[in-house]
Image (tube, rainbow, N blue to C red):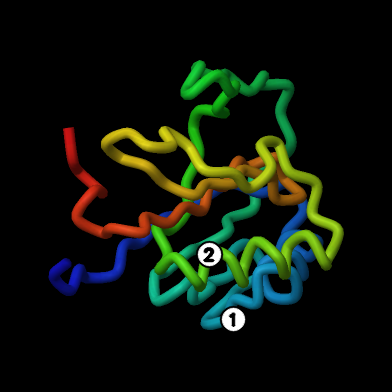
């Protein structure tokens, strides 16, 4: 797999301090620049920015994937296999409540992957995944 430039994503949060603590202490993201309305984080080499947005009554939409209700939208990072295993164990140890517990999706098929879904304190859905064979990332 070639080296990919870091992505940048900005997401809404209704409680900046609670989410700052979550990304810093639960996901172990290094904090970068910040203001009273946003905070930058290093999310596995990518730039994640949490921006304050007042809470809303929007409902989460889901799509069925591999028999699971996958929240849309969601974001995350494709990690190396062992990093995913260590990271998901760390999340369990820290008491993270999963929407979809870590498991192997599409087992024995093209695109086989480890995946896990959970929410940040603002209700943003995150998915972290890993492929034993990184060439399967875009396989059909």
* Circle nearer the viewer, 1 or 2: 2
The image quarter in which residue 131 lies: bottom left
Q: Quadrant of the N terminus?
A: bottom left
Residue occupying the far front of the picture: 108
What's the distance in space between the residues labelled 1 and 2, CA to CA? 21 Å
Q: Residues within 10 Å of mark 2 (few under 14, many from 20)?
A: many
On screen, residue 134 versus residue 44, left or right, reads left
Residue occupying the far left of the picture: 2
Of residues 125 and 39, the one drawn nearer to the viewer in this rendering: 125
Of residues 21 and 63, the one drawn nearer to the viewer in this rendering: 63
Relative vertical location of residue 109 with respect to residue 64 in this rendering, above or below: below
Mark nearer the N terminus (1 vs 2): 1
Q: Secondary structure at mark 1?
A: strand
Residue occupying the far right of the picture: 95
Q: Secondary structure at mark 2?
A: helix
Of residues 50 and 87, the one drawn nearer to the viewer in this rendering: 87
The image quarter in which residue 27 lies: bottom right
The residue under the point 73% across, 43% down is 98
The residue under the point 43% across, 58% down is 77
Relative image position of residue 106 (x, y in whole percent): 41, 33
Res 84 label: 2
Res 31 label: 1
């Amino acid at each position: 797999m070639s080296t990919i430039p870091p992505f940048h994503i900005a997401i809404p949060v209704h409680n900046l301090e609670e989410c700052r603590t979550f990304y810093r202490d639960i996901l172990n993201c290094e904090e970068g620049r910040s203001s009273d309305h946003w905070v930058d984080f290093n999310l596995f080499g990518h730039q994640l920015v949490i921006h304050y947005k007042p809470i809303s009554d929007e409902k989460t939409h889901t799509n069925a994937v591999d028999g699971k209700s996958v929240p849309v939208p969601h974001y995350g990072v494709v990690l190396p296999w062992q990093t995913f295993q260590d990271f998901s164990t760390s999340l369990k140890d820290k008491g993270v409540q999963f929407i979809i517990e870590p498991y192997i999706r599409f087992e024995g098929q093209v695109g086989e992957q480890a995946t896990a879904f959970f929410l940040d304190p603002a209700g943003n859905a995150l998915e972290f995944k890993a492929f034993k064979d990184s060439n399967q990332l875009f396989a059909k």
